[in-house]
Image (tube, coloured by chain):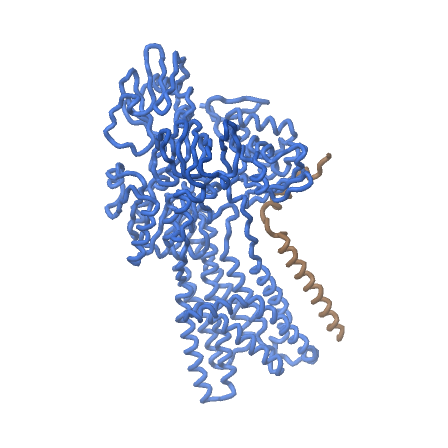
Chain colours: A blue, B brown
Amino acid sequence: MNTKKCYHCGDIAQENIVVYDDKQFCCNGCKIVYEIFKDNDLTAFYDFEKNAGSTPIKSTNKYSFLNNTSVVSSLLDFQEDGLEIVTLHIPKIHCSSCVWVLEHLQKLHTSIVNSRVHFSKKTVQITYKTANLSLIQLVNLLANIGYEPYISLENGEKKKAKNKQHIYKLTVAGFAFGNTMFLSFPDYFNQPDIWLAHYQPLFRLLMFLFSLPVVFYAANDYFISAYKGLRKNILNIDVPISIGVFVLFFRSSYEFFTHTGQGYFDSLSGLIFFLLLGKLFQQKTYDFLSFERDFKSYFPIAVTKSINNTELIVPVNEIKVDDILIIRNEEVIPMDGEIVNGTPLLDYSFVTGEANLIHKKIGDKVFAGAKQQGTSIYVKATKTVNQSYLTKLWSQNSYQKTSKLHTVTDAISQYFTLGLLFITLCAAIYWFWVDKTQVMNVVTSILIVACPCALALSAPFTFGNVLRILGKQGFYLKNSGVIENIANVNTIFFDKTGTLTTRNKQKFLYKGTPLTYQEISMIKSLVKNSNHPLSRTLFKNLRGDNLKINSFKEIEGQGIEGVFGNNILKIGSAKFTNTNNLDIETESRVYISLNNLPKGYYSFGSQYRLGIFDVLKKLSKKNRINILSGDNNASQEFLKKQSSEITNFYFQQSPQDKLNHIKKCQENNQYVMMVGDGLNDAGALLQSEVGIAVAEDINVFSPASDAIIDASKLEILPLFFKLCTSSILIVKISFTLSILYNLTGLYFAALGLLTPLIAAILMPLSSISIVLFVTIATNLTSKHLFGKV
Amino acid sequence: MSVIYILICVSLCVAVLFLFIFFIAVKNGQFEDQDTPAIRILFNDTLDKN
């Protein structure tokens, strides 16, 4: 068994090892890329990372839509004077070698002026001269070295500018915080010092001036949010924060103008700075993912139109009714239409959830979103892209996300604010009796020290850390609110095809009379001659000898037949191979018959994921589990045996049916999670409180959702649940700790003993210790669950 | 020691200038990409002969 790795891509070279220049390659494609690199002085590629390359795709017409000038114009960043700039998304970028070769593209073609990679977004921006190089040539060049770009309709749309306000505000607050701390230091030590007394007014003036941008610019989000909450009669956490900031500012300004004290400007800036830091930490964006993809990312940008026997590439938006379009193998039909020519073998699994390929005839109607498998077909458009049945469904308003986030921080802030006001009132009354002059001092001190800085930091730092941990484990959440939603879920809906089962058609199982090595060799030698995608999969994965075939015949839509000496081998549909199949097909099958005796069949792509039933069992302990499927109920018996008794099954569900199930549960006050993978789940994913999209390749496509999970990580979904529920617990514990700090401060404040020094110590101390606590707690939990942080 | 007035004014001006330059840098996308420069710095041949 040869276990040598391919020098270029690192795959174990099995058969067909190609040797070139004293190195081994797994296939001709890798060898060609190596040749290209060698001829152009790019072999340093292999110095940065070993086996960093990827196998180039076989040359296809995939990018032929780039011949259309209007499509090209919509994709370019800049186009003028013989120079063009384009930003291409290349999912295969994964290491420093990739960055190196993509930034040295000018060695591969002299027309390339410059190229710059953005590693976390996985994009490259290329500047090139158009005299000798067009976009389609550039894209094919990239595809030939193993870095094919992924271009979809959403590339043509302009991106929104990122909001950098929070960075500016944080910077202002940090700037003021640092400087104010320096300026307030001398005042902490109440020693009468002549020099100090002389310059004190200057220092205090400067502190006052620094605090102005902090209060009126950096902190204004909190005021706005508190005001909005109060208008709806909700006491959110920003209300006590705003009260604290106001009181801090006004008391300190009063002390400044009346020369009665140094004020609390340092605590003010520090407070805002820590709060804004928490807000920033809570955000985590994944540049290479998008949680908002819709059908536009799945549909092609352009299709081939057939006019009077000539072919023309047209953008998908320009398709008119009655246009005849040519749809090739693995291409998606972008609009509703009617078959006029060819043998359609359609994969609807992504849009309706049906697992097996649908055979159609000339004259049959087809829906947008189907993928053709096999030879090219001619389709006449009966609707435009936006008017097609499914695209209309996906754009419906009922699919807009309704945010019903009820955060744990907001829950506690109600009690906190009321408690605070109550204590203030009591203290005010007490001191009004005892010593009237102290009332303002005590009231303002209480409001200052009770400012829930630590409380407001608990959730952002906990959830920010958990977001990062989950992201490292292959579970990407849209924002920290999703964590709380996951912890509250009590009902889970799973889609069947593509979620519980793998969509990877590269896997297959054989059922029937066991085949001898000779028989397998015959099968392999027969499928070698067929271009059908299932034949190619069989050929690639079967182990057998190459036998000489006497005659080969392919019958469209039925199967293939070959003669080996005295044996006739038939591979294809059940009817073609004389098999009486009594059970209804639930996945794609090819049947085998030898000398007209049926032997068995290969079933493709519908294997249940490893460990998925354990996942269902574990989750069923605390949640109601339901399975929704677009298929018929043939697999119901099997599923019932494998999963626990509580599970409900619903078959033959259309996308609208799935959505309705979610709505019904929500009307019964259940907190629903949907786990699905295709466009047929899009409505359900948006309607449920938590929608998780399962993606085999996260770089490429996933429907709009709250979270994206790598398909291979589905088996640790229960651990992700545990982490989310633990993080809520950690937040609650840290709330308790921060309340202890507040009580300590309150002790000083209520007795009129609060000095700026105490406030300046207490506030950073509480904030930093809370942050440390939640970070360590979440890291420990993660270590316990996943074995690493 | 009254020079301290001047000293504080000047240092404040310098500091505010740096703050301003930081804002401009953020606005121009200087800090957009945190990861690629770290990789790029390890490349040997940044000077092209042609």
Q: Is residue A46 visible to the viewer in this orientation of the structure?
A: no
In this view, A570 is above or below A357: above
Q: Position of residue A416 (x, y in %)?
A: 42, 71
Q: Is residue A561 visible?
A: yes
In the image, farthest residue toward the top: A565
**Where does the image place residue A47, in percent across and percent down from the top left?**
60, 34
Q: How many marks?
A: 0
In the rendered image, the vertical position of residue A593 relative to residue A780, given as above or below:
above
Q: Nearer the viewer, residue A381 or A465?
A: A381
Residue A703 position (above or below residue B1): above
The N terminus of chain A: image quadrant: top left
Q: Nearer the viewer, residue A682 or A246?
A: A682
Asked if residue A187 lies left or right of residue A360, the reply is right
Given residues A769 and B29, the one toward you in this image is B29
Residue A569: image location, x then y, percent:
33, 17
Q: Quadrant of residue A571?
A: top left
Q: Quadrant of residue A129?
A: top right
- Camera-nearest residue between A316 and A199: A316
A748 sits to left or right of A188: left
Residue A51, above or below A245: above
Residue A605 in percent (x, y) is at 36, 33
